[in-house]
Image (cartoon, coloured by chain):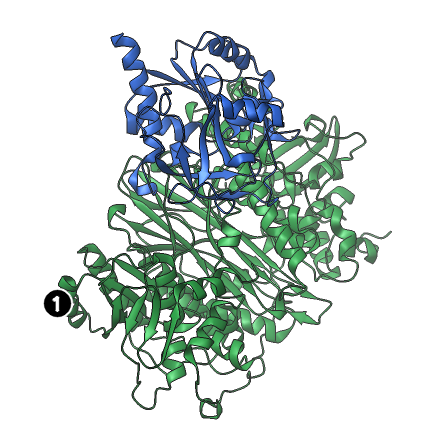
């Protein structure tokens, strides 16, 4: 399994994702520069957190035009795994690879804190190591994580089961008070219809070692690694 | 105009005195031209020259076997083992933050990050020590400063892991914003900003130069008055995205050996960075052509270019002939770089504009020429004494505890630190909210504990003792995590030193810092002085010597957090309590008094307590440790419960005469910790305590959903949490 971690100017979770892939998971790691027009044979492309190009215009609005993004779009069309985390999710929405948009948090403040997520899909290459409706503990760190989609899109997402993670309380109940940013339907992460492009605001790479407060994030990295094994076997 | 006369208004504009002007003319044997006058004005400002404080600062200890770099560089550095150096510094951005809170705070963060980068280190943590006037009046300062710190730190991707926030009337017109940055570098790659090698090139990299921030350093060296808001153009505007690119490009410089030195452009811009770089090498000078400086706007004069404080710029000294290698590294990040001059051996800073020479000044005159000011200290009036027996007895300890937990100086800071990304970097192994934060050094088992501390009310009541207590408090916060205090950076904030009682406060503070640091064998490796924190001579701040401290633990797996961990654990008070109500938060909140002497500090006793806690942590006897600070034992105990989500049950406290009940609960005696441990570890802790001659006393058992002192009071964690977290910030 070869993970590709994309680096835009202003990206900062690249090194954290790289650390988990290389040092904790022990998988192959390749950084991909935003000016690269070659995905260098990676099996899963991660768009990490940060402020790509400063996010001065609108989060992800400039990053979608980077040369590497065209290749990532083609890669996703062919069924390749693309995983946007935080700023990466915002970029995927801007690029049209996922529906909806991320607005400013309802509090109008940046939020860095732990959240509980209920996992609603475990048949995906990103979540196969999670159990049915498992509650995982993953931190967020964003000022614009308030997921929004128009009613038609939203009902389509819900009908097709494209909501992967929802903010919930410690017992798995999806409540208003468990929603840290005002996201519609408490949505924390969604997948495309085909199931190969995941976007999520929380940071699994920040909870993959016990000394950082938890290891639930590692389940997602392990799921992706295991999905490659499955391909090899079949 | 005669050689020795100059327009006094012009002198005021560049913040030079007629006496200083006379010295300049004498040294140059001619009158300085406009550009030279401006350059000397900024470098001789208090902010850059330390002319009022330099004599005092020499009294501070700055060496230990671990010190790799003491004061005088962009930041200090200490050896932490396994080939790593910790680089750190704290710096004030008070004046800009008073006028323009968001950008003032943001650029304060940006500036301190560049200081660490200049040492070749990757920044791994930020801390911010903040002081404001009381809420709600100060809310625009609080909002702007917190948003500015978050806006810069979150965007650049360096975690903000600690700091402090205090509210007091004395900061109403003069809020304090002190930012600290900690970085890591391999010891053999530690850089020093020395302009070595005649003929080597000087490259300016990063942002283009604009007219922003001209005379910022001079502005920071005068009192604020009603015209200060006109100085808003002297406050710079930050661009954290650009600095992120600059940071990564500077890290990439490690791939080449073409770089001789890196120097941050901060206060006084190009003038100060070139002069300081050259000034660190005997006989070195520099030749600069302002025409080669990339600019943001048209029509800038050489004066503007030399004095601009545009942010996100660095000066790089590059081996002659290898400029292209460096240019390519910056080009990869879409950053401009330009060769603007070269290192000379004539000891002069020469500035040309194409073919015209516009300034030529001896480097030593710029960096060391400012005449030191001989100021006189006169002891301030004794603050009001405290007749402890006249205080009414404590009636309802539970109600008092709730009021203290809800008071602005003691309430939870979660509302602030959740607005800062404190996790990026995957290194934060103790998050903010407890005592010190801790960062792991990835690839090793080493942990770095970091904190900033100062109780300025103590310093107001007794600056000598207050400064010692600030050092002790910082060290206690480090020790509470199980780490050994290693070194200090300090940010000394005072009012107008021309006033004898303020200068006396400075003398006393420095003496107190030196005394405590020597006793704990802690070197002060970097720092900053901020003076003139008063407004139109009226409201002066308390002396506020903020102590930033770094500590080391050899295996972060042994780290301790503040919150209780398990039901049934023994809860102990380590250290002894006295009638220490002077200067306490209890006195202020419950009796509206700022009076008495701060608690007495026995440095030997304090050290013995550190040794006990560290030995117990080393032997894994403890499950948690928390320092007793403002609010005393009971507030510390409540915090242990709230942070751990576990209550405590204690027998009633009946202190022996003459110790009062309020002093036992809320007195602020130093040298104390609340610890918890499994009952089976108790005998070993008792024998350790005897060996270190430290008193320990069993307070109660951890467990349940409330804090209870039998027959005295009982509060549920829920109502305590509501008071603590529902407060103003």
Chain B: give its colour: green
Q: Residues within 10 Å of mark 1 (few under 14, many from 20)?
A: few
Residue B466 appears in the picture as rendered: yes
In the foreground, A114 or B493? A114
Quarter of the image for residue B185 reads top left
Chain A rendering hue: blue
Residue B395 rendering spot, x and y as whole percentages: 44, 85
Placement of the C terminus of chain B among the 4 image quadrants: bottom right
Residue A187 image offset from top left, x and y in percent: 50, 33
Mark 1 = which residue?
A: B683
Q: As drawn, is A86 to the left or to the right of B297?
A: left
Residue B566 in which image quadrant: bottom left
Query: Tag 1, which chain?
Result: B
Direction from residue B428 to residue B568 in the image, left or right: left
Q: Is residue B608 above or below residue A34?
A: below
Q: Nearer the viewer, residue A232 or B688?
A: A232
Q: Nearer the viewer, residue B726 or B476?
A: B726
């Amino acid at each position: 399994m070869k993970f590709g971690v994309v680096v835009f100017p202003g990206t900062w979770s690249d090194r954290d994702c790289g650390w988990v892939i290389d040092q904790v998971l022990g998988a192959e790691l390749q950084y991909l520069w935003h000016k690269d027009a070659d995905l260098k044979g990676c099996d899963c492309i991660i768009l990490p957190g940060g402020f790509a190009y400063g996010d001065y215009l609108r989060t992800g609005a400039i990053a979608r035009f980077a040369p590497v993004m065209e290749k990532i779009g083609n890669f996703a069309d062919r069924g390749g795994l693309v995983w946007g985390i935080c700023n990466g999710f915002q970029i995927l929405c801007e690029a049209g690879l996922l529906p909806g948009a991320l607005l400013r948090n309802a509090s109008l403040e940046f939020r860095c804190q732990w959240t509980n997520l209920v996992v609603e899909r475990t048949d995906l290459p990103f979540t196969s190591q999670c159990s049915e409706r498992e509650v995982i503990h993953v931190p967020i760190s964003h000022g614009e994580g308030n997921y929004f989609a128009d009613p038609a899109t939203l009902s389509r997402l819900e009908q097709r089961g494209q909501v992967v993670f929802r903010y919930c309380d410690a017992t798995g109940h999806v409540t208003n008070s468990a929603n840290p940013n005002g996201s519609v339907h408490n949505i924390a992460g969604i997948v495309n219809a085909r199931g190969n492009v995941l976007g999520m605001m929380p940071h699994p790479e920040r909870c993959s070692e016990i000394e950082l407060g938890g290891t639930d994030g590692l389940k997602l990295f392990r799921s992706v690694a295991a999905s490659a094994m499955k391909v090899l076997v079949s | 105009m005669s050689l020795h006369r100059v327009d006094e208004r012009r002198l005021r504009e560049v913040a030079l005195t007629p006496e200083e002007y006379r010295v300049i003319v004498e040294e140059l044997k001619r009158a300085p031209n406009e550009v030279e006058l401006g350059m000397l004005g900024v470098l001789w400002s208090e902010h850059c020259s330390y002319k009022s404080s330099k004599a005092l600062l020499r009294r501070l200890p700055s060496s230990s076997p671990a010190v790799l770099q003491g004061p005088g560089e962009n930041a200090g550095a200490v050896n932490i083992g396994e080939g790593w150096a910790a680089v750190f510094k704290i710096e004030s951005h008070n004046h800009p933050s008073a006028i323009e809170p968001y950008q003032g705070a943001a650029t304060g963060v940006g500036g301190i990050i560049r200081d660490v980068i200049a040492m070749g280190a990757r920044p791994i943590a930020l801390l911010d020590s903040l002081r404001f006037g009381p809420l709600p009046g100060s809310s625009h300062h609080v909002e702007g400063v917190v948003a500015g710190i978050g806006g810069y730190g979150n965007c650049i991707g360096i975690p903000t892991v600690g700091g402090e926030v205090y509210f007091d009337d004395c900061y109403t017109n003069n809020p304090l914003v002190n930012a600290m940055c900690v970085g890591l570098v391999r010891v053999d790659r530690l850089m020093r900003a020395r302009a070595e090698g005649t003929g080597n090139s000087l490259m300016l990299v990063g942002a283009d130069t604009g007219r922003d921030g001209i005379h910022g350093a001079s502005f920071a060296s005068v009192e604020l008055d009603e015209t200060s808001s006109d100085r808003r153009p002297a406050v710079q505007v930050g661009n954290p995205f650009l600095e992120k690119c600059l940071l990564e490009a500077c890290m990439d410089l490690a791939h080449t050996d073409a770089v001789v030195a890196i120097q941050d452009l901060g206060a006084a811009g190009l003038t100060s960075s070139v002069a300081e770089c050259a000034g660190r090498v005997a006989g070195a000078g520099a030749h600069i052509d302002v025409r080669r400086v990339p600019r943001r706007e048209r029509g800038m004069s050489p004066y503007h270019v030399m004095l601009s404080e545009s942010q996100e710029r660095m000066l790089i000294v590059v081996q002659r002939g290898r400029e292209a290698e460096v240019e390519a590294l910056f080009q990869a990040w879409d950053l401009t770089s330009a060769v603007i001059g070269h290192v000379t051996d004539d000891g002069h800073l020469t500035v040309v504009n194409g073919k015209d020479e516009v300034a030529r000044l001896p480097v030593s005159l710029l960096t060391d020429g400012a005449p030191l000011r001989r100021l006189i200290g006169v002891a301030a009036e004794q603050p009001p004494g405290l007749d402890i027996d006249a205080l009414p007895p404590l009636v309802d300890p539970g109600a008092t505890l709730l009021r203290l937990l809800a008071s602005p100086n003691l309430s939870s800071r979660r509302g602030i630190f959740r607005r800062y990304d404190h996790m990026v970097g995957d290194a934060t192994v103790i998050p903010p909210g407890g005592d010190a934060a801790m960062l792991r050094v990835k690839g090793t088992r080493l942990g770095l504990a970091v904190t900033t501390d100062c109780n300025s009310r103590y310093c107001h009541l007794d600056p000598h003792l207050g400064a010692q207590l600030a050092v002790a408090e910082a060290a206690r916060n480090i020790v509470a995590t199980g780490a050994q205090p290693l070194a200090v950076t300090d940010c000394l904030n005072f009012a107008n030193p021309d006033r004898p009682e303020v200068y006396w406060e400075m003398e006393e503070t420095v003496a107190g810092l030196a005394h405590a640091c020597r006793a704990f064998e802690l070197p002060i490796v970097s720092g900053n002085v901020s003076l003139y924190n008063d407004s139109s001579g009226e409201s002066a701040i308390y002396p506020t010597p903020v102590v930033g401290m770094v500590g080391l633990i050899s295996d972060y797996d042994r780290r301790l957090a503040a919150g209780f961990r398990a039901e049934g654990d023994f809860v102990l008070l380590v250290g002894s309590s006295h009638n220490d109500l002077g200067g306490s938060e209890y006195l202020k909140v419950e009796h509206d008094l700022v009076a008495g002497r701060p608690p007495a500090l026995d440095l030997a006793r304090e050290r013995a307590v550190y040794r006990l806690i560290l030995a117990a942590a080393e032997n894994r006897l403890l499950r948690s440790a928390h320092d007793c600070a403002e609010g005393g034992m009971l507030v510390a105990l409540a915090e242990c419960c709230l942070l751990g989500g576990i209550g405590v049950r204690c027998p009633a406290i009946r202190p022996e005469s003459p110790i009062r009940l309020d002093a036992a609960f809320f007195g602020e005696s130093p040298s104390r910790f609340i610890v918890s441990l499994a009952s089976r570890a108790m005998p070993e802790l008792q024998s350790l305590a005897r060996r270190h001659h430290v008193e320990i006393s069993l307070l109660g058992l951890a467990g349940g959903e409330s804090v209870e002192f039998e027959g005295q009071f009982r509060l549920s964690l829920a109502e305590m949490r509501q008071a603590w977290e529902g407060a103003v910030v």
